[in-house]
């Protein structure tokens, strides 16, 4: 086992343990994931994702990769955008989440490909996709820089990476947001999903994730150009966008 450590929420764990612990969290919450998303965000996650689709610039015939796509909210929206001549790949490292997303795609009439894979080792060729997205998944990855570099690798020149993720809230709102995150969120997790600890981890993982400017710098260091970001809901969430030149 390596001596290297990383964060799992506020805990420090061996790098080898994080992937297993994150898998346990999402396997536990998969069956109530969509309901909890609506409750946790008061439905705002739908607007954040709709904005992501709008900013993506995806058109008919494009190839799109949805990394850590979970229950396929973005994949479904992109499938409608790219049409029959395009392609959307739904990927996730967690089998329980991917299975729900794949089934949901089929239930909506889209026979799009799905692959269980690690974002740090994407099984796709260089310069392949017009757009790569990762929504609320980057913060759970052990080596975020490696994952960003992989997502850049599979983009074609001129393609764009979109990272939708929780970020740093506007400071005057921080005390209220902290109260919500560390008190109300685990309580809701217990009541709805019978799992307070997983939602306590989710709240902690947000605090350990890089803020807006830090993530922008990481994307630039990975070789992405013209990186910018949009603060949504007073910075509760940020959408970062970068291009492969």
Image: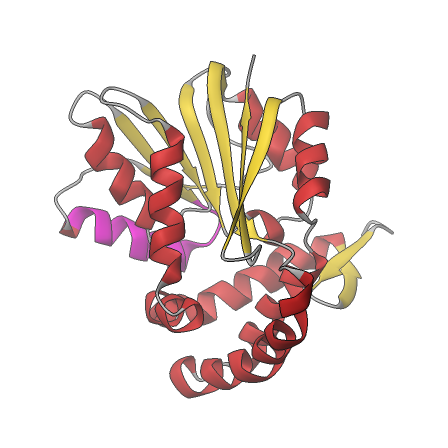
Which residue is depicted at the point 60% across and 69% down?
Answer: 203
Q: Hey, which residue is sitting farthest right in the picture?
A: 3
- Whether residue 101 is visible, yes or no, is yes
Judged from this view, the residue extending furthest toward the front is 172
Marks counted in the figure total 0
In the image, farthest residue toward the left: 109
Rendering coords of residue 188 (x, y %): 46, 83
Which span of residues is magenta-colored?
Answer: 92-106
Identify which residue is drawn at 23% across, 53% down: 103
Q: Residue at 17% of width from left, 28% of height from top? A: 83
In depth, the one of 110 and 54 nearer the eye is 54
- Res 130 → quadrant: top left
Residue 200 drawn in magenta? no
Give coordinates of residue 131: x percent, y percent.
42, 26
Locate residue 236 relative to residue 159 in the image: left or right: right
245 vs 52, left or right, is right
Quadrant housing the C terminus: top right
Secondary structure that dominates the magenta span: helix
Residue 8 at what x, y percent from top left? Answer: 70, 63
Would residue 112 be seen by someone viewing this image from the given angle? no
From this view, report whether residue 58 is shown above or below residue 176: above
Q: Residue at x 38, y 73 (%)?
A: 39
Q: Is residue 96 magenta?
A: yes
Q: How is the image coloured?
A: secondary structure
In-front residue for pair 151/215:
215
Vertical order, 234 against 218 (above or below): below
- Figure check: 245 above or below 155: above
Q: Position of residue 165 (x, y in %)?
A: 54, 50
Most foreground residue, 184 or 228:
228
């Amino acid at each position: 086992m390596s001596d290297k450590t990383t964060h799992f929420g506020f805990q420090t764990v061996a790098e080898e343990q994080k992937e297993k612990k994150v898998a346990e969290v999402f396997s536990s919450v998969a069956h109530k994931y969509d309901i909890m998303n609506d409750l946790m965000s008061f439905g705002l996650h739908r607007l954040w994702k709709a904005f992501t689709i709008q900013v993506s610039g995806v058109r008919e015939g494009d190839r799109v990769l949805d990394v850590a796509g979970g229950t396929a909210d973005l994949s479904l929206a992109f499938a409608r955008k790219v049409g029959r001549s395009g392609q959307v790949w739904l990927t996730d490292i967690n089998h329980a989440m991917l299975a729900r997303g794949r089934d949901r795609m089929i239930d909506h009439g889209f026979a799009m490909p799905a692959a269980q894979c690690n974002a740090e080792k994407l099984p796709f060729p260089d310069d392949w996709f017009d757009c790569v997205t990762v929504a609320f998944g980057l913060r759970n990855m052990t080596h975020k820089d490696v994952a960003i570099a992989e997502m850049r690798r599979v983009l074609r020149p001129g393609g764009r990476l979109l990272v939708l993720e929780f970020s740093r809230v506007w400071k005057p709102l921080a005390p209220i947001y902290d109260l919500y995150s560390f008190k109300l969120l685990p309580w809701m997790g217990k009541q709805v999903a019978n799992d307070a600890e997983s939602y306590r981890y989710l709240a902690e993982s947000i605090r350990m994730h890089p803020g807006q400017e830090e993530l922008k710098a990481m994307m630039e260091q990975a070789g992405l150009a013209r990186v910018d970001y949009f603060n949504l809901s007073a910075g509760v969430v940020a959408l970062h966008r970068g291009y492969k030149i």
